[in-house]
Image (cartoon, rainbow, N blue to C red):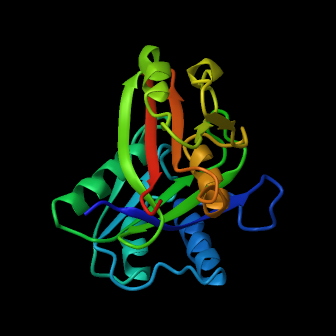
Amino acid sequence: MSLRLHNAVEYTAGPDDPDLQPLHHVDIVDRLLERAAQRETAVGPGPDLVVLVYSDADTQGHKTTASHLNLRTGGAAHSFALTAPGTGGPFAALRVADACARTGRGSSSVLALVERAGADGVSVASGVLLRLDGGPGYGVAATLSVPLTELADSCAALAPERGRMLLVLGPGTDPAAAPIPRTDIRTPPADSSSTAVWRLLATESEAWREQYPVVALCAADPETGTGHLAVLRDLDQ
């Protein structure tokens, strides 16, 4: 089966937020779960895979946050933490979740993408909680990692024959990577890095489905010279 985006929520805390400062990974995860429950989009019982994704190490090392997330979302899933410098971690986690579903090892996944304030270019603590399963929603069509020199061609190849595509360009992504025909561009807030494009997905994905059969999330990692793409398609159209 191909995973679909069932729901997504985000949490953001600025430097003057009255919440506990600094926020650790477990604090961000707990706030994401609280927000999901408030929106009546709680992850529910039974995810088969739970992944915590982060690019910067947590100074609170005595708690295994991936296991904590697993416990709070049912406790029966395979769970692990995936850490990758730069912006590539969430894309790798999505690839793992999709592969797990396609091989029949799991029909639902929960991904928690967390980012503490204080890293280069990161002025807010933020997180995004993604629930992926077989229900209605954008389907995960592909996740790609390509050299930055090939990013523009990779984006251009995604433009649909009918309708329009939305391309979400993360911080540091060259606007020249955007194909002109049938493509609209969005850019997320520049106060986060690895969670940036995913925050925009969490807040606007429901509205996007009414306009765009294809959404591509794009992030650049200049240190490794790599561009990352996650391609979501509305499989119900």
Camera-side residue of 112 and 144: 144
The residue drawn where x is 30% and y is 60% is 2
Q: Residue furthest front?
A: 162
Drawn side of residue 142 relative to residue 208, left or right: left
Camera-side residue of 236 and 155: 236
Is residue 225 placed above or below 8 in the rendered structure?
above
The residue drawn where x is 33% and y is 82% is 46
The residue drawn where x is 47% and y is 78% is 43
- Is residue 225 in sight in this rendering? no
Number of on-image labels? 0
- Residue 138, horizontal then vertical, whole percent: 47, 59
- Residue 80, horizontal then vertical, whole percent: 31, 61
Drawn side of residue 79 relative to residue 14, left or right: left
- Residue 203, horizontal then vertical, whole percent: 67, 60
- Is residue 153 in sight in this rendering? yes
Camera-side residue of 40 and 11: 40
Residue 10 is drawn in which quadrant?
bottom right
Residue 179 is drawn in which quadrant?
top right
- Residue 71, horizontal then vertical, whole percent: 38, 80
Is residue 218 placed above or below 206 in the rendered structure?
above
Residue 209 is drawn in which quadrant?
bottom right
Drawn side of residue 113 relative to residue 27, left or right: left
Q: State which quarter of the image contains the N terminus.
A: bottom left
Drawn side of residue 8 relative to residue 43, left or right: right
